[in-house]
Amino acid sequence: MTGPEHYREAELLLESIAEFESGSKEEASRLAEAQVHATLAIAAAVGLATKEVPKTSRTGKRHRLTREHLEAVASVYTEALAEGEPPTRAVADHFDATHSTAAKWVTHARKAGLLSVTTPGRSAS
């Protein structure tokens, strides 16, 4: 069952409780079953939310590695390099990402041919 199906089943079970005597074993059983379905619906919703929004930055905003994103990374990197600033740190700050994530983006931008190949720790001259 999907999350919405579990939610609907919980609603149906709760609606059917009226046919049982208050405090009866049948009523308690239906309540318990409805609670299980409601809990599974919530678990499915949380699971989907977690899969759809993986965190790659300090704010949790996901940046897909599209050509457009890598071009923006290369632009920020090149501008920082020209201004004598640490370029990878500038990328991290600009996108509110960790330094590690920014370094990975820079590597992808290099592989895409958007930045020249350098020796690690040395800027391209």
Image: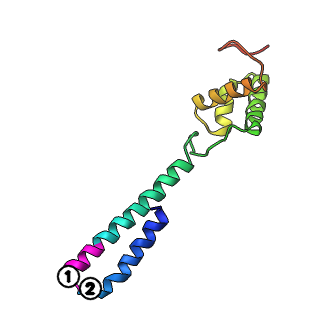
- Residue 24 disc label: 1
Where residue 80 appears, as percent x and y from the top left, is 75, 27
Where residue 89 appears, as percent x and y from the top left, is 65, 28
Which residue shows up at 43% across the image and 66% down it?
6
Kind of element beneath mark 1: loop
Residue marked by disc 2: 20
Identify the image quadrant of residue 26.
Answer: bottom left
Which residue shows up at 37% across the image and 63% down it?
39
Identify the image quadrant of residue 35.
Answer: bottom left
Q: Is residue 48 magenta?
A: no
**Mark 2 is on which residue type?**
Phe
Which residue shows up at 78% across the image and 24% down it?
113
Instruction: Report if the CB atoms under discs 1 and 2 are less than 8 Å apart.
Output: yes
Pick the quarter of the image with the C terminus. Answer: top right
Query: Residues in magenta?
Result: 22-31
Where residue 115 appears, as percent x and y from the top left, is 77, 23
Left/right placement of residue 85 relative to residue 53 reads right
Left/right placement of residue 60 relative to residue 118 reads left
- Dominant SS type (magenta): helix
Q: Is residue 125 above or below residue 26?
A: above
- Near mark 1 (Cα within 10 A), the count class, few <14, some 14-19 or many ≥20, is few
- Near mark 2 (Cα within 10 A), the count class, few <14, some 14-19 or many ≥20, is few
**Mark 1 is on which residue type?**
Ser
Which residue shows up at 62% across the image and 39% down it?
96
Q: Is residue 28 magenta?
A: yes
* Alpha carbons under labels 1 and 2: distance apart: 7 Å
